[in-house]
Image (spheres, rainbow, N blue to C red):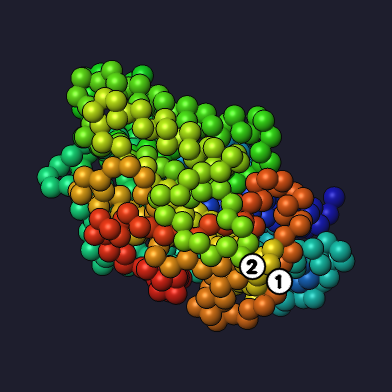
């Protein structure tokens, strides 16, 4: 058996497994480039990826003779140390999903196998004169070289993401602290592990408050917040004697995804309306009622604004008889039930929330690639808000005593084409590549309205209550985030 060829074949398998792990876990399900706690892990990934890139390309077409063989083993030794360090850092910063743990185990076993096979050739290679000898391996060599290029790009991506997270941490540290209330208060937060929820919980902790989070994954949430919050899996775990000053309800399954089949609609309703009903029932039975329930909603409440209609929608406008509007209306009605128990209720109708996580990174990907342009004509209105302003507006409502519905959008609304033009300008990319809307409509059905239709929404009640936006215009918001 040619152990060297077998080692290269196992390396090719390593490249395929590594690509799956990077794309499915690190980029999609775990979204590491947007996690504030993932900086060290991404730095390790970047260094390992660049080492693997050199190894894949080197072994694809060269034999390492003499002292080069020993250097190869030393590089593999460094890679093993980095892998073990990566395991430790991962276990300290996040709870890995089962599929990622299995993938990492297979990668470690496979990596150990091909390193051992290459080590078997080391004595023979050391006996030869020191040289890098051209030895192509046909299609296998070409595939390994392509793997090397891919993993190198991934390493640069991770290095850039780690750098960006570091800059964001410096920005957050320098930003003024948000005040939710005078003195220490007790908060119950649902949806705390989501993009907005994570920012909210950290802001509450910085402001010196006690936080309890309701989550389907309490262990993961405990790790996410370094054990600084209490985590419960259901409202039944909270006795009626438990006291909360404020309840902030952000829970809800991701609305953009599978088509809105009857089953999917039921999931969306249960995750929003069903959970909100459970929170309100608990409030009704609690010995000490919270002073405020802040409950999430969305500007989808207003339905679809016809193309060419530039009417500015405020909180005075009503819903439409379509699913996304009904979902928001029923969600707000469920939260409003807490008012019967003497609780002040404020519903937050979120626009597109801009941050390093959430929808913005995927929205900007075509722009970064130089393919930014109007989507589906580009005339649909897009109402947005910077995540820092969203957290600030929550704190404002906690302090000001407001109730009813509030639009959480920036004062500036743009069409989708204008949004992409500003993004392209901030990123110094070309603009103008149009994208037709019909493929999205075909794939997503009614759900495509979230992307191809829009609403021009103004934060009338927030402005009237005295809230001042830090990022009222898109250009300054994107400059801050990018």
Say left or right for 8 vs 207. right
Residue 327 versus residue 10 in the image, above or below: above
Say left or right for 200 vs 156. left
Residue 370 drawn at (x, y percent) = 65, 76
The residue carrying pointer 2 sits among few (fewer than 14), some (14 to 19) or many (20 or more) residues within 10 Å by Cα, namely many
First in sequence, mark 2 or 1: give its number: 2
The image quadrant of residue 459 is bottom left
Say left or right for 134 vs 456. right
SS for callout 2: loop
The image quadrant of residue 38 is bottom left
The residue carrying pointer 1 sits among few (fewer than 14), some (14 to 19) or many (20 or more) residues within 10 Å by Cα, namely some
Q: Nearer the viewer, residue 436 or 82?
A: 436
Q: Nearer the viewer, residue 94 or 183?
A: 183
Residue 205 drawn at (x, y percent) = 25, 47
Q: Are marks 2 and 1 in contact (CB under 8 Å)?
A: yes
Residue 219 seen anywhere in this rendered image of the structure: no
Residue 457 versus residue 99 in the image, above or below: below
Q: Nearer the viewer, residue 130 or 463?
A: 463
Q: Nearer the viewer, residue 321 or 415?
A: 321
Residue at coordinates 13% horizontally, 47% vertically from top-left?
182
SS for callout 1: loop
Residue at coordinates 57% horizontally, 76% vertically from top-left?
421
Q: Marks 2 and 1, Cα distance to the nearest angstrom?
A: 8 Å
Which dot marks residue 378?
2
Give the residue at the far right of this rendering.
138
Residue at coordinates 42% horizontally, 30% vertically from top-left?
334
Residue 296 drawn at (x, y percent) = 41, 42
Which dot marks residue 69?
none
User: Which residue in the structure is indicated by mark 1?
Assistant: 434
């Amino acid at each position: 058996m040619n152990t060297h060829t077998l080692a290269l074949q196992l390396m090719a398998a390593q490249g395929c497994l590594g690509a799956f792990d990077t794309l499915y876990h690190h980029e999609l399900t775990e979204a590491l480039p947007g996690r504030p706690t993932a900086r060290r892990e991404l730095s390790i990934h970047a260094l390992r990826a660049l080492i693997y890139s050199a190894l894949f390309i080197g072994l694809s077409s060269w034999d390492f003779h003499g002292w080069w063989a020993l250097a190869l083993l030393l590089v593999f030794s460094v890679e093993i140390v980095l892998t073990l360090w990566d395991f430790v850092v991962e276990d300290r910063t996040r709870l890995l999903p089962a599929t990622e743990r299995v993938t990492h185990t297979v990668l470690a076993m496979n990596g150990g196998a091909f390193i051992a096979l290459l080590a078997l050739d080391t004595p023979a290679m050391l006996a030869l004169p020191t040289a890098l000898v051209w030895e192509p391996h046909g299609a296998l060599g070409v595939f390994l070289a392509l793997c090397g290029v891919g993993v190198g790009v991934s390493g640069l991506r991770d290095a850039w993401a780690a750098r960006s997270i570091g800059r964001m941490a410096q920005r957050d540290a320098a930003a003024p602290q948000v005040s939710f209330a005078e003195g220490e208060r007790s908060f119950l937060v649902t949806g705390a592990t989501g993009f907005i929820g994570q920012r909210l919980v950290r802001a509450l902790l910085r402001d010196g408050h006690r936080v309890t989070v309701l989550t389907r994954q309490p262990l993961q949430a405990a790790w996410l917040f370094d054990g600084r919050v209490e985590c419960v899996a259901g409202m039944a775990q909270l006795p009626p004697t438990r006291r909360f000053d404020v309840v902030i309800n952000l829970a809800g399954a991701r609305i953009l995804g599978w088509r809105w089949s009857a089953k999917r609609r039921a999931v969306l309703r249960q995750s929003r309306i069903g959970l909100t009903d459970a929170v309100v029932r608990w409030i009704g039975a609690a010995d000490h009622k919270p002073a405020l329930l802040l409950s999430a909603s969305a500007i989808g409440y207003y339905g679809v604004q016809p193309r060419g209609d530039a009417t500015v929608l405020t909180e005075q406008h009503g819903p439409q008889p379509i699913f996304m509007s009904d979902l928001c209306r029923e969600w707000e009605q469920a939260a409003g039930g807490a008012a019967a128990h003497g609780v002040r209720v404020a519903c937050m109708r979120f626009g597109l929330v801009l941050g390093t996580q959430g929808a913005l990174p995927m929205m900007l990907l075509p722009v970064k690639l130089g393919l930014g342009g109007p989507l589906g004509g580009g005339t649909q209105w897009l109402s947005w808000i910077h995540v820092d302003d969203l957290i600030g507006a929550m704190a404002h409502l906690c302090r000001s005593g407001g109730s009813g519905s509030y639009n959480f959008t920036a004062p500036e609304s743009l069409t989708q084409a204008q949004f992409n033009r500003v993004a392209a300008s901030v990123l110094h990319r070309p603009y103008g590549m149009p994208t037709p809307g019909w493929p999205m409509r075909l794939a997503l059905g009614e759900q495509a309205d979230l992307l191809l239709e829009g609403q021009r929404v103004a934060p009338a009640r927030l402005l009237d209550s005295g809230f001042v936006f830090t990022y009222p215009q898109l250009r300054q918001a994107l400059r801050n985030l990018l």
